Image (cartoon, rainbow, N blue to C red):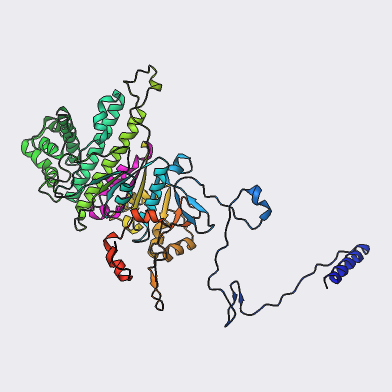
Amino acid sequence: MGWIDDTADWTMRKWYRLLRKEMPAVVAAYESLPGLTTRGFVAPGGGAHLHVDAPIQFQGMSTQVAGLWPFSNGTSSPLIGAPLGRDQTTGQPLLGDPLSLFLYGIMSAPSAFILALNGRGKSSLVVRICLGIMDLGFIPLFLGDLKPDYVGLVKAVGGQHIRLGLGGVGCVNALDAGPIAKWLHRLSPQTRTEVEGQIHGRRVNTVAGLIEMMLRRRLSEEQSEHMVLSTAIRVAAEEAAQEGRQPELADVRRVIVARHPRIREAILDMSEDEYDAEVKSLVKGITALGPEGVFGGMFWGQTTVEMDMHAPVVFDVSSIDEGEADLRAAAQLVIWSYGQAGALAAQTLANEPDMEDPEPDAAKKRRLGPEVHHLMVMDELWQILQAWEGSVYRINTITKVNRQKGLGQIMITHSMKDLELSTSERTKMAFGFVERSSMVFLGGLAENEQEDLRRIRRFSDREIAQLVEWSAEGTVNPATGEMNPPPGRGRFLLKTSDAPGIPFRIELTSQEKEIHDTNAAWANAIAAARGEGAAA
């Protein structure tokens, strides 16, 4: 009957043209079918699909796929940096990391913050990012691995594994200048002055943080405690340099107790009794950091292993028991400072001309070291804030200058609640860690997080609902016994601004699983529970 319809249509069009009238539009009337949905007929025997697979998506240039319009999707995710996973909206690969996007001018700072509940894949995301940046020539520094999560990765790539802990496991000097110390004599006078100023500031910040953690209060400006400490550290450093070594906390204590003239001069004239009363609390705090204190001298002597400036490094503090909360927090503070010192040493050497090079033109002289860029991984932020929330001031000092020094950072904790401290000033400073981060990765979070999240970024109701959905635990099918992992495992929402975020999923490769197993301590128990036999 097709030719009859065609003939009738032709005749009708001809007739209307002769009458100079517009042919009425043909409207088909469709009768609604009860029970019909986008997944088929929802009725017994109707054959409705419970699950509809997403269509396969292909990517091409606009000139190549123009003829397929409107069946194509645009994408704005740049293919720059470490491969993160697959965009859950478009199905496209998602790439990016703080260092790469900053160097390309896409981000204003080389920093990221990761927020997610336990078991949602925070460390897996970090491993993926760090594997990617190493392939691009950058160097990750895992500063304070408490579990450990990153030792396997560093060993697999031939990096440096430094163990720290009590009982002779390892020590890091709280006053260590870092690898730059043995290069000071090769620096120009101006650069050396600048570097020595940075070293002194870092020493004062670190030791002050440790003492405040012991005293449970900030150093008093009224009692000139900060001035006394700064002067004592400077004197101790000068005396130690004459002996060809790094200063130690014991040197600082000795200088203060001896009532050094430069300290007496700095805090004005007073009697010996008045001086002793002025510094009593400070000396008590320094003494508590010694071998007989709760830290067991872990920061008292010389550093046992110097970090390598040009290789991935992990500072493994997993030997410190979870019950030693103060010691774990103190270790984080000291290692973050020491790791930063190592990275900045590499930057200094890369920018400093070698004056022993015979090339007459200073601009063309070879440099004292190759140009490298580091990414500091600062995990378990909640631990140090919980042990002594006044540490927020010290963390702020450590992290604020990283961008200017060519150093990237990733900070990690469980939730925004970890950043809510006892005063609004401290809370604002802690929230600033997230606000200053150009990349914010969010995994499964509790519903009561939304108010705090919206203080740092703009979130849609759908994004909040998605994060809450990802916070659910896994399930077990009662009929088959099949176990399903938490729905949010490996899923993250990447926010780089107030614009809509990008939901993506990480799927670890077999090689990544071999070097990164956060449940290694539970391997045999997990295998037994699943009926798989003992783990190898």
Tell me which corner region of the image, top left, top right, bottom left or bottom right, holds residue 37: bottom right
Toward the viewer: 333 or 526?
526
Give left or right: position of 435 versus 64. left
Identify whether 457 is placed above or below 259: below
Q: x and y percent of residue 399 in the render?
A: 33, 43
Quadrant of the frame with the N terminus? bottom right
Residue 117 horizontal side relative to residue 64, left or right: left
Return the residue found at the far bottom. 44
Q: Quadrant of the C terminus?
A: bottom left
Q: What span is colored magenta in the figure?
A: 375-404
The residue depicted at 54 percent of the width and 50 percent of the height is 76
Counting from the top left corner in percent of width and height, residue 413 is at: 33, 55
Residue 109 visible from this viewpoint: no
Q: Is residue 385 magenta?
A: yes
Whether 497 is among the magenta residues is: no
Above or below residue 188? Residue 120 is below
Residue at the farthest left position: 273
Q: Please determine whether, in this image, residue 297 is positioned above or below residue 513.
A: above
Could you tell me what secondary structure mostly forms the magenta stretch?
Answer: helix
Residue situated in front as seen by the camera: 196 or 184: 184
Q: Nearer the viewer, residue 160 or 472?
A: 160
Q: Residue at x 92, y 66 (%)?
A: 15
List x then y, in percent, for residue 227: 19, 37
**Count of residue discs:** 0
Asked if 366 appears above or below 100 in the picture, the reply is above
In the image, 64: left or right of 341? right
* Residue 248 location (% of width, % of height): 16, 38
